Image (cartoon, rainbow, N blue to C red):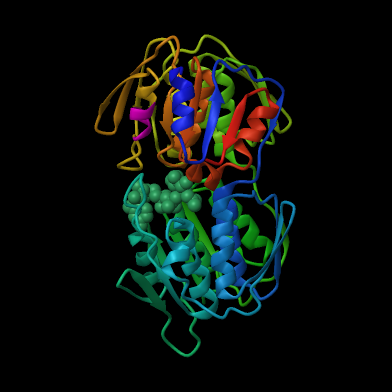
Amino acid sequence: MPFAARVSQEIKKPHLQIRGESSLSGEIKVSGAKNSALVLMAAALLTDESLILNNVPELTDIDGMSAILQFMGVKLSRSQSSLQLNANQIQHVEPPYDLVHGLRASFFCIGPLLGRLGKAKIPLPGGCRIGARPVAEHIKGLKALGAVVSVEHGVVSASVPGLSRKLKGASVVLDCPSVGATETLIMASVLAHGTSTIENAAQEPEVQDLANLLNEMGAKVVGAGGPTITVEGVEKLYGCNYSVIPDRIEAATFLLAAAITRSIITVKPIVPEHLNAVLQKLRDCGCELRYENNSITIFPGDIKGVDITTQPFPGFPTDLQAPFMALLATAQGTSVVTEKIYENRMQHVAELERMGACIRLQGNTAVIEGVPQLSAAPIFGTDLRAAAAMVLAGLAAKGTSQLEGLKHLDRGYENFEKKLNLAGANILRHQN
Ligand code: UD1
């Protein structure tokens, strides 16, 4: 029996069978941003009125956040991509560890709970495969706003002393521009007494999306998208109808799928300013990009190696490090990729090597000598973005690859293989 057939017989876990040497064409539609949607859902805790979020992707992470909010008492219903949330009655402010575990964004509920009710108890979500994921900056900021915070037995307990149970505006300078800490502190301060400033704030588009939603709800948040954010506390927030921004990481993953298969495709909707650092690297690699309204068409040329260092926004995003490395594994010449955000986000290197990639890893720096062709193998997606990277590698490789680790992929990419198949890929999902 040929090796590939034997391997596919032996695999019992859910996996994707990815046919290599694929060619893609046409247009791929981008879903709403996972990282925005998760935090916007938490913002529903800030009002007793209904919040309708449109363009919410169907993902297991969104299901996880829904379950946490429902546990707290939030009424939630979905109609296609719209999610209606009503936090009229919050019954529990302490979600259990088994719901919170594995969904880091669940911790972001601490800000709105403290802001609205003056108390919250959230289990620490813990680290994950890519790194430790501390929340010290969140806690430091909440303390500055007047909360009493303690961490015991893996649970963060926070409460606001005094009769009014209201947080008080304060100035916070973050040690590092943490996305989650910035979002937590914005949500904590929108209902506080007085004015807060967050300096060295994260500038990611998802932070801007949160500020835009909160302002629609009646908040006064100024400066999101820049390093200093000012929040003037208001008495009350209201319901509204709001659309989540397109997922910049998903959009770029599809552009990279085109580049690695040397195919011409159009990706939309896309906000190019959310992806400037990545689009520049694609051009440096030899890709031509044509912009039209809210779409980008990519024309890959001969792909050349480039150097990449991950940085907070507007720098190159860590979430695209692995997918871009898959492309560089097939580029002409040498590339150097340095991961600066997470201490353990190089696990895809070993998987790419199994497909014939030539990569030397020194700490968090990978030196990649491009090879003319990857070869199919049984592979594993070690985390969400690594799994996407391995799908891309599988599309380009010679032969048919089997990818396990789909629980990671399904956390963050809506209908990933379906979208790629509509563009000409041949990816089959096997449940066992
Ligand atoms: C968010 C994204 C995630 C992305 C990351 C960085 C969501 C749901 N997730 O995660 O996909 O990879 O931004 O762009 O939006 N740090 C500290 N102390 C803290 C908090 C963070 O040192 O208190 C450090 C982390 O260890 C890491 C860096 O700051 O090195 C970035 O983390 P952060 O921006 O907080 O990431 P998340 O908000 O968890």
Q: Position of residue 192 (x, y in %)?
A: 52, 74
Which residue sits at x=35%, y=65%?
Answer: 140
Which residue sits at x=62%, y=72%?
Answer: 74
Q: Position of residue 328 (x, y in %)?
A: 43, 20
**Please, is residue 353 above or below residue 407 in the view?**
above
Magenta region: which residues? 347-351
Which residue sits at x=51%, y=29%?
Answer: 391
Left or right of residue 2, residue 45 in this image: right
Nearest to the observer: residue 13 or residue 68: 13
Q: Is residue 354 magenta?
A: no
Q: Position of residue 285 (x, y in %)?
A: 49, 16
Nearest to the observer: residue 254 or residue 162: 254
Left or right of residue 148, residue 236 in this image: right
**Please, is residue 350 above or below residue 101 in the view?**
above
What is the residue that sits farthest to the bottom in this orientation?
A: 163
Q: How many marks?
A: 0
Instruction: Let me know if residue 389 appears in the view.
Output: no
What is the residue that sits farthest to the left in this orientation?
A: 362
Q: Position of residue 107 (x, y in %)?
A: 45, 63
The quarter holding residue 45 reads: bottom right
**Please, is residue 310 above or below residue 165 in the view?**
above
Left or right of residue 200, residue 26 in this image: right
Magenta stretch prevailing secondary structure:
helix
Instruction: Let me know if residue 96 appears in the view.
Output: yes
Nearest to the observer: residue 125 or residue 239: 125
Which residue sits at x=44%, y=32%?
Answer: 10
